[in-house]
């Protein structure tokens, strides 16, 4: 009996199961919270944009809405990214803002992950996960609202995935 059981067990272990489906699901990060908070533009990290230094990517992006140097300095000096966001919303936007806002965001986010090795490593550690800036404040341009719903354009997530791809490609070059 032991021999029969051993043979059956051996066959189970050594014989591949042809009918077992392959599982190659890609992970999805649906919110920039907790361990993925670093993906948020509110993450505290120095950003240099057009010669000025900002305490977060949010500060830099909001300041870029104006071409007035004093307004940019005022936004850079605000204590929190939430304050910077509110200040940016109150600005009279530069005439070309609709044309440049996606490029500005990409430039700011690229700086964040190409000038800070720790953040670069964390972004690369997300592997090939789909990145969604899930939010509850109904931002369907930069993110997905509500989180995980698929409702939104997710431009911030797309920018992050593009930069991650660029960083991976650069690492692959000799």
Image (spheres, grey):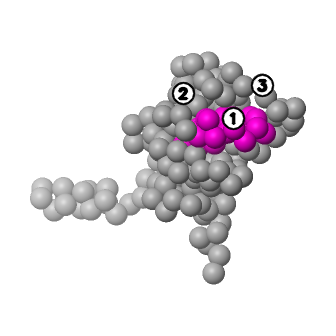
Earlier in the chain: of badge 2 and badge 3, it is 2
The residue closer to the viewer here, 135 or 47, is: 47
Quadrant of the snapshot with the N terminus:
bottom left
Q: Going by the image, does 97 lie left or right of 156?
A: right
Please give the label number shown on residue 92: 3
Overall secondary structure of the magenta section = helix
Q: Is residue 164 magenta?
A: no
Q: Position of residue 66 (x, y in %)?
A: 76, 35
Q: Which residue shows up at 54% across the image and 43% down it?
A: 56
- Mark 3: secondary structure: loop
Q: Position of residue 155 (x, y in %)?
A: 69, 37
Marks 2/1: CA distance?
A: 13 Å
**Numbered range of the magenta stretch:** 56-76
Answer with the quarter of the image where residue 141 lies: top right
Q: Going by the image, does 160 lie left or right of 96?
A: left
Neighbours of disc 3 within 10 Å: few (<14), some (14-19), many (20+): few
Quadrant of the snapshot with the C terminus:
bottom right
The residue that mark 1 highlights is 71
Q: Position of residue 57 (x, y in %)?
A: 59, 43
Q: Is residue 161 visible?
A: no
Tag 2 near tag 3, CB within 8 Å: no
Please give the label number shown on residue 83: 2
The residue closer to the viewer here, 150 or 162, is: 162
Earlier in the chain: of badge 2 and badge 1, it is 1
Marks 3/1: CA distance?
A: 10 Å
On screen, residue 166 above or below 171: above
Q: Is residue 109 visible?
A: yes
Neighbours of disc 1 within 10 Å: few (<14), some (14-19), many (20+): some
- Mark 2: secondary structure: helix
On screen, residue 36 above or below 30: below
The residue closer to the viewer here, 152 or 107, is: 107
């Amino acid at each position: 009996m032991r021999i029969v059981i051993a043979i059956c067990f051996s066959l189970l272990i050594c014989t591949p199961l042809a009918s077992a489906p392959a599982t190659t699901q890609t992970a999805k990060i649906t919110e920039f919270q907790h361990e993925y908070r670093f993906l948020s533009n509110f993450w505290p990290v120095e950003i240099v944009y057009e010669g000025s230094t900002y305490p977060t990517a949010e500060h830099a992006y909001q300041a870029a809405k104006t071409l007035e140097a004093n307004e940019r300095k005022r936004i850079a000096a605000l204590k929190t990214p939430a304050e910077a966001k509110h200040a940016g919303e109150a600005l009279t936007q530069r005439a070309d803002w609709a044309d440049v806002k996606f490029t500005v965001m990409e430039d700011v986010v690229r700086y964040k992950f190409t000038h800070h090795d720790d953040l670069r490593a964390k972004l690369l550690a997300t592997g090939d996960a789909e990145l969604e800036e899930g939010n509850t404040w109904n931002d369907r341009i930069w993110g997905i609202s509500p989180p995980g719903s698929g409702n939104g354009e997710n431009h911030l997530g797309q920018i992050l995935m593009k930069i991650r791809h660029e960083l991976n490609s650069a690492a692959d070059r000799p």
